[in-house]
Amino acid sequence: MLAGDVTDEELLDAENVASMDVYCAVTNDDETNIMSALLAKRRGASKVIALINRSSYVNLLQAGEIDIAISPAQATIGTLLAHVRRGDCAVVHSLRRGAAEALELVAHGDPRSSRVVGRRIEQLDLPKGVTIGAIVRRRAASAKGGDDFEVIIAHHDTLIESDDHVIVFVVNKRMVPMVEKLFQVDVAFV
């Protein structure tokens, strides 16, 4: 997380944005998110994601330098999509006017019964155009009595564990069935 003006090129360089796999711009200001994501992309970030509330901005940016423009207004459709997806799909967000999707898939099983559990991201047979952006992992119960979660930004060497919630970006929704199949456990898993 950056503390400072996220449109300051010197700050982005100081934070080594060029080595980042994924840069997420999620302030409350659309213009700041757009400019920050564009600057991060031009400074070398592999993928950039921007939170954008105005649908007209989302439509303008979909084919540009910003890899993924997320609009909360489009999130409602994701609730419906999650119900029609196979496997354990917690959340789906429709992107790029329905042409792409962001999925939150739950990894189940063990290294013998799963194609993802116990493997590093670089070891997964991901179709071209599919990116794992983050992993949400449950930690031990907190002192307050509830579960505690950590968000892990995905890198090539990130290991996926059972019950991890894996955030997957799919640039072409025709690839979704392949991703769902990758996350399904073998029938022998109990």
Image (tube, rainbow, N blue to C red):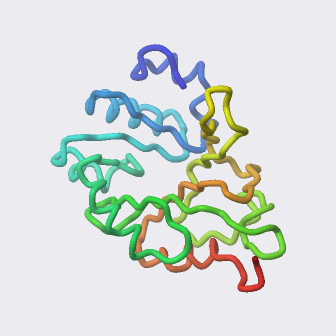
Whole-percent x, y for residue 45 in the image: 54, 39
Identify the residue shown where x is 80% and y is 67%.
Answer: 110
Q: Name the outermost residue toward the left.
A: 56
Q: Please say if 48 is above or below 115.
A: above
Q: Please say if 20 is above or below 16.
A: below
Q: Name the outermost residue toward the top.
A: 4
- From the viewer's perspective, tell me whether residue 105 is left or right of residue 93: right
Identify the residue shown where x is 54% and y is 38%.
Answer: 44
The number of numbered badges drawn on the structure is 0
- From the viewer's perspective, tell me whether residue 93 is left or right of residue 43: left
Taking depth in this image into account, of 14 and 96 the one nearest to the observer is 96
Identify the residue shown where x is 39% and y is 71%.
Answer: 83
Q: State the quadrant of the N terminus.
A: top right
Whole-percent x, y for residue 134 in the image: 58, 48
Q: Name the outermost residue toward the right.
A: 112
Q: Please say if 169 is above or below 46.
A: below
Taking depth in this image into account, of 54 and 59 the one nearest to the observer is 54
- From the viewer's perspective, tell me whether residue 33 is left or right of residue 182: left
Q: State the quadrant of the C terminus.
A: bottom right
Identify the residue shown where x is 44% and y is 59%.
Answer: 91
Whole-percent x, y for residue 6 in the image: 43, 22
Taking depth in this image into account, of 38 and 119 the one nearest to the observer is 119
| Picture quadrant where residue 51 is located | top left
Taking depth in this image into account, of 48 and 187 the one nearest to the observer is 187
